[in-house]
Image: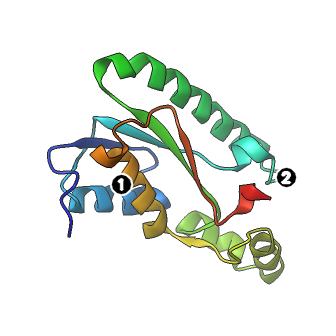
């Protein structure tokens, strides 16, 4: 296992469910102290692309998260803290599992994704780990989509 995050601190939003626990475990396994330093906010394509009709509150909260990320990136860069966002698409996680049990919803959701499948949480955690690492030392205020191509079309 790489220790590319040794001596770094990371804050994981949404650490209680979904992608968050997987991201926190990945960061810790790579040597990060989870709880400060580089900030990686978990957003959603629903906050930028209107791809989840009827999820009004969720989508608008995710759009607000991106606004917060942008202003934090500007405010905290002078303290050598980078702030970025990862935008996972449909991900095999507990919050999505209930929806995906419905065959019609599953088929409709996956048909919109060029890769034709949902992500596994560790795939999203890899992007988060990159954004928290020195490999992304010149990245701040950025939005990284990890959505299987959903927002490319």
Q: Quadrant of residue 78?
A: top left
Q: Which class describes the residues within 10 Å of circle 2: few (<14), some (14-19), or many (20+)?
A: few
Residue 131 lies left or right of residue 97; in this view the side is: left
Q: Measured from the top left, where is residue 123 in percent x and y?
A: 47, 67
| x 77%, y 70%: residue | 109
Residue 40 lies left or right of residue 80; in this view the side is: right
Q: For mark 1, what is the residue?
A: 129
Q: Of all residues shown, which one is farthest toward the bottom?
A: 103
Is residue 22 or residue 152 the one in the foreground?
152
* Residue 43 visible to the viewer: yes
Is residue 60 or residue 29 the one in the foreground?
29
Residue 114 lies left or right of residue 30; in this view the side is: right
| x 73%, y 42%: residue | 48
Task: Compute the Cα span from label 2 to label 1.
Answer: 31 Å
Q: For mark 2, what is the residue?
A: 53
| x 40%, y 47%: residue | 131
99 relative to 85, above or below: below
Q: Measured from the top left, where is residue 75 in percent x and y?
A: 43, 17
Q: Measured from the top left, where is residue 35 in percent x and y?
A: 27, 40
User: Considering the image in quadrants, where does the N terminus appear?
Assistant: bottom left
């Amino acid at each position: 296992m790489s220790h590319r995050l040794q001596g770094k601190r990371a804050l994981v939003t949404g650490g209680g469910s979904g992608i968050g626990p997987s991201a926190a475990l990945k960061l810790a396994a790579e040597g990060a102290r989870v709880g400060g330093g580089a900030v990686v906010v978990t957003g959603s394509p629903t906050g930028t692309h209107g791809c989840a009709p009827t999820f009004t509150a969720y989508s608008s909260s995710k759009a607000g998260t991106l606004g917060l990320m942008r202003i934090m990136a500007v405010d905290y860069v002078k303290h050598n803290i980078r702030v970025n966002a990862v935008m996972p698409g449909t991900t095999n996680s507990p919050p999505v599992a209930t929806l995906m049990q419905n065959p019609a919803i599953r088929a409709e959701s996956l048909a919109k994704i060029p890769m034709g499948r949902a992500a596994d949480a560790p795939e999203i955690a890899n992007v988060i780990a990159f954004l928290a690492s020195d490999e992304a030392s010149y990245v701040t205020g950025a939005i990284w989509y990890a959505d299987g191509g959903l927002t490319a079309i």
